[in-house]
């Protein structure tokens, strides 16, 4: 397991060696298969996970049964970290999208670490601030961006975290269904599919099942603005 991945997590990024060793020693490594659920919405939150490898989606169900995809997380990101601030009911359901490896830390153990290493509190505030910035940016996109713009931005974001260079461009194995991709950008499946078809016709992307190859990053970046 790459320690660089763990170190890249905002909560742990700037810790001194002693504090990092204490936190790392309290974490338990676990591997999870595709399709398994880490936790469900409404369950009590008593731990969080650092993604060392793999991919996780966070989903929310509305009272009328409709579902939305809040985020897709990958290596170096935390799942279920709200339990660190408030060990209340989970606000989303976390489902593993691809075979994944996690570092798991119980809330009670983390509280003990906070008492022993007060510097962790500053890192928690940093992590919370970054989460709020992402939420604000996502809300702004819903208000000010059209659907094709949001689709382009989502593809670029997924490429930045999961993309791998190939001969023609960057292949992004997002592992999402068409419906989930639509939920991620906050639009109907038909509208998102229309945008993807347009991008494909223009030669900006190439569709490949639950993956996409980005062929023209410059045009996509311009469309995402």
Image (cartoon, helix red, strand yellow):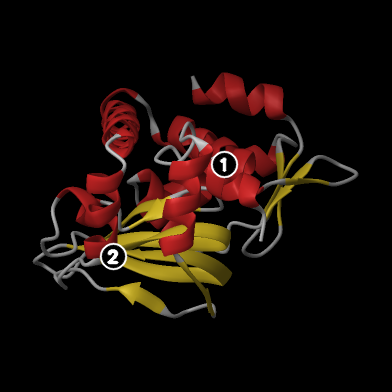
Q: Residue furthest right?
A: 167
- Decide: marks 1, 2 in contact (CB < 8 A)? no
The image position of residue 126, as x and y in percent, is 33, 30
- The answer to whether residue 112 is above or below residue 132 is below
The image position of residue 93, as x and y in percent, is 28, 67
Judge by depth and name the residue closer to the eye, 68 or 137: 137
Q: Tell me the residue that label 1 is attached to.
A: 155
**Does any portion of residue 204 appear in the rendered image?**
yes
Judge by depth and name the residue closer to the eye, 77 or 14: 14
Q: Secondary structure at mark 2?
A: strand
Identify the residue at image location x=32%, y=33%: 119
Callout in the foreground (1, 2):
2
Q: Quadrant of the N terminus?
A: bottom right
> Does residue 144 appear to the left or right of 162 in the view shown?
left
**Does any portion of residue 179 appear in the rendered image?**
no
The image position of residue 35, as x and y in percent, is 47, 79
Q: Tell me the residue that label 2 is attached to.
A: 47
Which corner quadrant of the image does residue 79 belong to?
Answer: bottom left
Identify the residue at image location x=48%, y=45%: 20
**Marks 1 and 2, Cα distance to the nearest angstrom?**
30 Å
Identify the residue at image location x=57%, y=46%: 196
> Does residue 97 appear to the left or right of 112 in the view shown?
right
Q: Few, some or many C-alpha atoms within 10 Å of disc 2 (few <14, some 14-19, many ≥20)?
A: many
- The answer to whether residue 67 is above or below residue 166 is below
- The answer to whether residue 218 is above or below residue 4 is above
Q: Which is more N-terminal, label 2 or label 1?
A: 2
> Does residue 171 appear to the left or right of 72 in the view shown?
right
């Amino acid at each position: 397991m790459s320690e660089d991945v763990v170190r890249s997590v905002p909560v742990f990024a700037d810790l001194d060696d002693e504090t990092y060793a204490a936190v790392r020693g309290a974490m338990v490594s676990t591997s999870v298969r595709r399709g398994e659920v880490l936790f469900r919405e409404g369950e009590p939150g008593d731990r969080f996970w650092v993604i060392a490898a793999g991919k996780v989606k966070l989903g929310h169900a509305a009272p009328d049964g409709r579902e939305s995809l809040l985020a897709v997380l990958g290596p170096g990101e935390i799942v279920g970290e709200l339990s660190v601030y408030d060990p209340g009911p989970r606000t989303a359901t976390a489902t593993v999208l691809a075979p994944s490896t996690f570092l798991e830390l119980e809330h009670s153990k983390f509280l003990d670490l906070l008492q022993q290493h007060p510097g962790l509190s500053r890192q928690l505030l940093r992590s919370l601030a970054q989460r709020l910035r992402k939420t604000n940016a996502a809300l702004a996109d819903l208000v000010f961006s059209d659907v094709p713009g949001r689709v382009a931005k989502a593809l670029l974001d997924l490429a930045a975290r999961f993309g791998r260079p190939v001969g023609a461009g960057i292949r992004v194995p997002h592992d999402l269904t068409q419906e989930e991709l639509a939920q991620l950008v906050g639009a109907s499946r038909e509208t998102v599919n229309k945008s993807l078809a347009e991008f494909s016709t223009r030669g900006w992307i190439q569709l490949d099942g639950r993956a996409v190859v980005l062929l023209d990053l410059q045009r996509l970046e311009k469309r995402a603005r």
